[in-house]
Amino acid sequence: MAYSNQGKSLRLVQQFGPGLEKRIREFLGWRSGRIVFADILGEQYDVQVDSCFPNTQSPQAFVSTTYCNPDKPGHSNENKFQLKVGELMLLKARYPDIRSILVLGGKQDTWMPYVLAAFRYFFDEVVCLWEEASEAYLAEIGKNPSIVSLKHVDVWNQIANEWSDINFSGDPPIDSRLRLDAWEWIHEVGVEGDEPSEISNSIIRRCMGAAYERFKGSKGKSGKEWSNYVNASWDEIWQSRSFFNPGEAVIQMTLEEAKVAFLGGLAVDVEVPSMLHTLGGSVYERTKTAEDFILYSRKYDCPVYVQSKSSGGGRDRHGKNIQNRAKEQITRGLIYRTRVDENQQMILQDKDFVWIGLLDGNWGVTEKTPHKYIHMLQMAGYDYLLAADSLVDNLELVEPDDNPLRHIIDELDCLDDKEALKSAWSDWKEKRFALRDLLTIAPQIEVSEGEFEVDEEIED
């Protein structure tokens, strides 16, 4: 009778979401808490888990719980996928034999098919609460989690070995104010004219110029930062992440000044291949991963990804969502490097691309573990991490000799002909992933407002 009542409560809560993690934990009879996933340079890093067996000190199994709002089908699906797989990777690299169980609430039609399929591939077990036998099976797992078979143990061990060889940074964590300084400048100076060319600051002029062109081309449907600018709607400009993006602006200005060929640009991302495309099946055709800029290094004969990344937190620069942003990059690093063989086994390939991150915001916001999120980005696979405001002086692009991104680009000896870049990029993808026709060229994606952003509602 007690089990029947518990099951009824689970079915009720999985429809609406709030309280799901607690009800699952009570149903299993397990504990919640924080599990340590790394000890680096005297700092101990942990991650919150919804349910853990038998305890957080010696974990043998964990349950991660999430749901999709039935009123918003597909909402945050891709973000939740990246966050949950990032959490999985952190724990599996420390405890390769820990059993991972993902519990999904909501209804099946609120989840994109490819997300469900990808969850089932990565996690040792996925329990969907809308399925008839889900609660009985979850009860069995609660009593004996060893009934769950382990997946991809070799890959998790490989990743653990790689992470142990990383030269983790001991420098002060990046704390950049580029976007905040740009917003404060525009708020103080105000509207300078009816054309972007009248804006005195070159970085703001670049941002508003791109918004202006998109605003005109879309007849006001996109690029609304421009109308916000001319109407002095400064709070709305702060909320706009597509065109009011000084980080992407200074990257593009640096690349243009260096006269190197690149794909992408301010509010124009470049689709890049990932292992999701090698899983096969039409359910994966809707997925896409993208970087802000793509170059090609002659020195290493490989592509160079350049990503502008903010720690989030608004103008207060709080750390509420920074761990989610770091987890997202952990997942990207995994799916960029892995592929699936003919037996559906995950293969970790050598990292044959250069990854540069331009970081804005306070990445050392956590006082007890100030290096945590910089180190997580290093775990993800970033080769270079730069402060966004290190590219500017008095809110103008620094001279080439003082520009750290320019130094890296010069050292990598990147192609300077765009057609040669397109050819090298296409050849690399075909050789690296043997992808289907949909990724044999380098599509560029016009980014709608808010796209590719980690959902601010998702908390650790």
Image (cartoon, grey):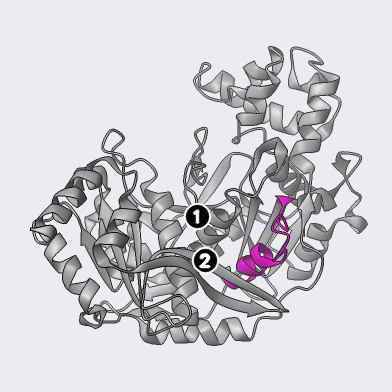
First reached walking from the N terminus: tag 1 or tag 2: 2
Expressed as whole percent of the image width and height from the top left, the position of residue 145 reads 25, 78
- Quadrant occupied by the N terminus: bottom left
- Pointer 1 with pointer 2, Cβ within 8 A: yes
Segment colored magenta: 360-379
Q: Residue at x 62, y 65 (%)?
A: 377
Expressed as whole percent of the image width and height from the top left, the position of residue 369 reads 69, 66
| Residue 237 painted magenta | no
Q: Residue at x 51, y 38 (%)?
A: 447
Residue 18 is marked as: none
Of the pair 333 and 260, the residue shown nearer to us: 333
Q: Under tag 1, what secondary structure?
A: loop
Is 302 rendered above or below residue 72? below
Expressed as whole percent of the image width and height from the top left, the position of residue 25 reads 31, 61
In the rendered structure, which amino acid carries the disc numbered 1?
Asp
Q: Of all residues shown, which one is farthest toward the front?
A: 2
In this picture, residue 413 sits left or right of residue 154: right
Crowd rating for badge 2 (residues with CA inside 10 Å; few <14, some 14–19, many 20+): some
Of the pair 300 and 224, the residue shown nearer to us: 224
Residue 47 is marked as: 2
Q: Quadrant of residue 172?
A: bottom right
Q: Let me know if residue 25 appears in the view.
A: yes
Q: Let me know if residue 337 appears in the view.
A: no
Q: Which residue position holds label 1?
A: 460
| Residue 373 painted magenta | yes
Is 194 rendered above or below residue 445? above
Crowd rating for badge 1 (residues with CA inside 10 Å; few <14, some 14–19, many 20+): some
Is 359 rendered above or below residue 63? above
